[in-house]
Structure formats: structure tokens, C-alpha cells
Amino acid sequence: MTPDQAKAAGNSLFDAEQSRHQRGLLSAEHPAATMDDAYAVQRAFTERKLAEGRKVIGWKIGLTSRAMQQQLNITTPDSGVLFDDMAFASGCTIPAGRFIAPRIEAEIAFVMKARLNGDVTRAQVLAATDYVAPALEILDTRIVRAEGGKTRTIIDTIADNAANAGIVMGDHRNDPNGDLRWVGAIVKRDGVVEETGLGAGVLDDPVTGIVWLARRMGQYGQAIEPGQIILAGSFIRAMECPSGARIDADFGPFGHLTCNFA
């Protein structure tokens, strides 16, 4: 893709988010697009948000599970940007019409106290982490999930800011040096258990995702900054959240959080 094409695609994603009307598959329009092209579109999309006065509060890591990677025929995660207007507190009610087709995932959030980028080690990630907390990621898609017999590819997902739309943070602050592979959650929708999972579902260790992100960001001249929140990746399948849905995520000793969709 040319720089102009990437900018135009990023603008179309911004417009889709504002209008709550999805655009067509980017991968169908640009079948030769690479992952680098997709990240260029994501940058154009996020630059529009920055121009509107939004602030970066962190990053999300997606496609960390083996099942999702196999579904998209890839062997690497992806990443997206968290903005200040995406942050919600536990117990919140998400306004009706805020998102197009919201879904949620259960994740471990890392809150950083030191800068990270480039070829870092697991020990360096843990030393740079202030605390870890339970979180829900709200997913939304500005690009349709299927069109004309074709489905979203990794190109569409990356360009669409890794389907990132919101984050609900719990109040618990936990030591990052515990065995995060065994952190689990029971997630209910409307009082019914829909999903359960363990942190090990995220690349066998949620810290591994942060190592990957720091290295990827180093390749693009970016860095994880102190105070930023990093969503390490989901260990449950994405759950649909139609209007009226009540979500309860019980992480046991790690924390508990809820949200409602008006």
C-alpha cells in the first residue's frame, strides 16, 4: 500500500467508528497488503484520534491463543493502542450505542513503572511492572467480519487497531512475580457462566506477550512507557455483549469486576 492509501484507509476506520457503520474488508480492497501495511493503516487511524485530543494510555496484545492464530493462519500476536476515552471502571454501565457490535474478553493487565522497548527479557519485564490487575477488554470491529464470502484476515484485524475498543479495570493490585499462568476467571453473562480460562492460555505465560510487544515496538521506533497499561491477551473466547448484557468476571483472589451494557 502507498502512504496515501494507508492514510485513506485509516481515515475510513475513524469515520466508521464515529458513524457506528462498519466499512468493507480492507484485505479484499488491498489483497497484496502486508502486516507492515496494516500497521501503517493502524497508525493513520490512531493519528486521527490523537488529532482529536485523545491520549495514549497503553497497548493491547491480541491473537495470543493458539486457536486464534490457527484460525488466521499466523504464528504471531498483534497489537493495538489504548486511548483515555476507552477506559471504564468496574461496575460501570456502557452507554447504549457507544459501540457497533461489542464483545468482551478476560485478561491480565500490566501497569508499568519503567520504560521498555527492544530485545528485553522476561526478568526485565517483571522488573518494569508496577502491578498486575484483572481486566476486561471490550472488542469492537470497524471492519466487517465477513463480506462476499470472505472473512477478516490478520490485515483487517491489525489495521482495525486490533479490534480494540475499551478496557474495564479492576481495583486489585497484584504482585507481577506470582505464577500468572494459574490466574483464572469465571465469566458470567446475565448470571450464566459462559467462559472460564487460565492465564496459561496466553502464550503459556502472559509475561511472554509483554516481551513480544517490547520487541515489536522497538522495530517501529516505539516504546512502552511508565504508567501505561498493557493488556496481555485474552484467555477466554470473545463473548458477545448485546444491549442489556450484565457481565461478571470473578478472578478469585486476583480480583473481581463487573460491567453492564445499556
Image (cartoon, rainbow, N blue to C red):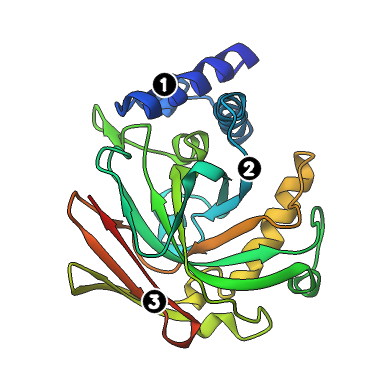
Amino acid type, label 1: Asp
Mark 1 or mark 2: name the one nearer the start of the chain.
1
Q: Residue at x 60, y 85 (%)?
A: 179
On screen, residue 4 versus residue 93, left or right, reads: right
Instruction: Identify whether 233 is placed above or below 243.
Output: below
- Residue 33 or residue 207, whichever sits in front: 207
Q: Which residue is mark 1?
A: 15
Q: Residue at x 27, y 42 (%)?
A: 101
- Circle on res. 150: none
Instruction: Identify whether 50 is placed above or below 203.
Output: above
Q: Position of residue 56 (x, y in %)?
A: 63, 42
Amino acid type, label 3: Gly
Query: What kind of element bears circle 1?
Result: helix
Q: Nearer the viewer, mark 1 or mark 2?
A: 2
Instruction: Identify whether 32 is placed above or below 175.
Output: above
Instruction: Identify whether 146 is placed above or below 58.
Output: above
- Circle on res. 56: 2
Cα–Cα gap, marks 3 and 2: 29 Å
Mark 1 or mark 3: name the one nearer the start of the chain.
1
Q: Position of residue 207 (x, y in %)?
A: 65, 70
